Image: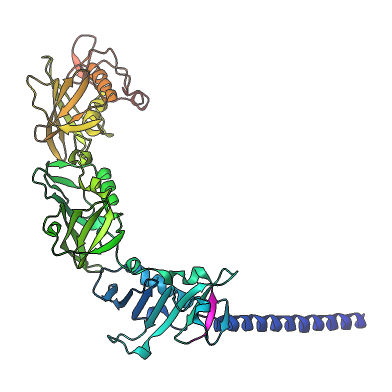
Amino acid sequence: MKSGWNLNLILLAVLLVGGGGLYLLDRQETQEKQEEEASRLISSIKPTDVMQLRHTDAQGNTVRIQRTPDGWQIVEPRAMLTNNSLPDRMLSFLESHYVRKVTDSVDDPASFGLDTPRGRFSLTTSAEVPAKQEAWTTYRLGSKAVARPEVYLQLGEGGPVVLAEARDVDVLTKSINDLRDNDLFPGTYRRDLVRFEIRPTDSTATPLILEREGPDTDWNMIQPLAIRTDGDKVRGWLDMLFAAKGLSYMEKSQESEEVDRPDWTIHYTRVVATQAGPDAESATSQHLLTIWKGDNTLHVAREGESDLMRMAAYLKDDLAKAPLELASLRPLPDYWQIDAVTIERSEGTSTLTAERSGEKNRWPLAAWDNIIELFTTKSEQVRLRQERQGAPFLTAQLQGEKGERTLSVWKEDKRFVVVDQSSPVEWLATTLQGESLTAALDVVSGKSETDDSNKTTTSESGSEPSSNGVDVPASEPSEQEETGAVKQ
């Protein structure tokens, strides 16, 4: 028995010693692997410590970029609007690891494609302008290795050549134009706009002006029509403009007549934060774009740029947007809730009135919802208001918390048209809206025997006729009755 315990202790000791040895061996291998990987780090410089960049592309164009409190700024050969995110992406290669070292010295640069590098990238942690030459660290991107997926990269002037993963260093092949901000509206988000104007210089065209109270409010059209707009349509249109990117750049010819005669100017106002935090403050800033038509492109002059940006010609269609394409298809604003309505028919019948009431704030008959929907839901088309003779099919006085509106409904063949005399446009109802209105009017005026919503016959005043001919107040529809609302 004792010898059995001794044997178990011996086996346990062997197991512990063996396991400990394997653990130490594995730990040593892991440490050696980490040290070897660290030795292949492309640079020990942290991207966040870099203060200046100097980049030369494959065509030999060179720019110097400087870090600023707001991001990055191209400062040489001249100040240019800058793609703020690209310099940071380019610097990310510093934290990559190369595959293996090829040579410590380069006798024949052409054999690695370093005589005509695809990119030459210099950086410094010095904020001095200009930094001394010895403060710069330079990397040159060569050609792709033969029969290998990696590319040659030289670490420092006269430094070793290594093989690096193409995905890690291909960002160094970016052109100078890539480093510029190629947005039509540089440094601006659509959500920050509060005023937007497109002014054609053609004397026969009128400007299109949109305005709103703040970044999170609805747009109203100021010119050429003072109307409400459809929020989704305006956002979609502005998104198309804000997604537009420049194709290339061209020098501005001072002798050209087109410089003084643009085809459009865009004036826009945006909200700019002046102080962050709980006591955030903001101000507005005004900006200008000047646009000319070219042969197959548009030419855009932006503030702070001495040259012109070429853009795709299709953009001219968005610049010539028809105002009615942005108009709201709803006769009433989206946020309106109608609490009382009075309808006068041209046929000489009695006035129809109704109010919301009860705990659930419902109409006396569900058919009133169908009438109200003519004014609150999207119509088929919005168009310029026409002058009409005679009396409308009906006039509706609508009351709610937001105020009071009077709208008229006209019959046009078999269609209905909603008219607001205070608006320059009118709304052509859909066929379904017209059918629903006709059926609902029959119910609330008593021409229809029953309202499917509550199974009661209602007089024009909204009360139920009793058996002795005296009107009594209409009863509140039950939950089951409410589900049978007149819907076409």
Residue at the spot 53% in from the left edge and 78% down from the top edge: 111
Asked if residue 335 is positioned above or below residue 302 in the image, the reply reads above
Given residues 324 and 332, the one toward you in this image is 324
Whether residue 156 is in magenta: the answer is: no
- Quadrant of image for the C terminus: top left
Eyeballing the image, is 405 above or below 184?
A: above
Return the residue nearer the eye: 343 or 136: 136
Left or right: 133 as drawn, with respect to 139: left
Q: Position of residue 283 (x, y in %)?
A: 16, 64
Query: For residue 445, which quarter of the picture?
Result: top left
Q: Quadrant of the N terminus?
A: bottom right
Residue interval drawn in magenta: 159-164
Residue 163 in magenta stretch = yes
Is 468 placed above or below 183 here?
Answer: above
User: Residue extending furthest top?
Assistant: 468
- 341 up-or-down from 183: above or below: above
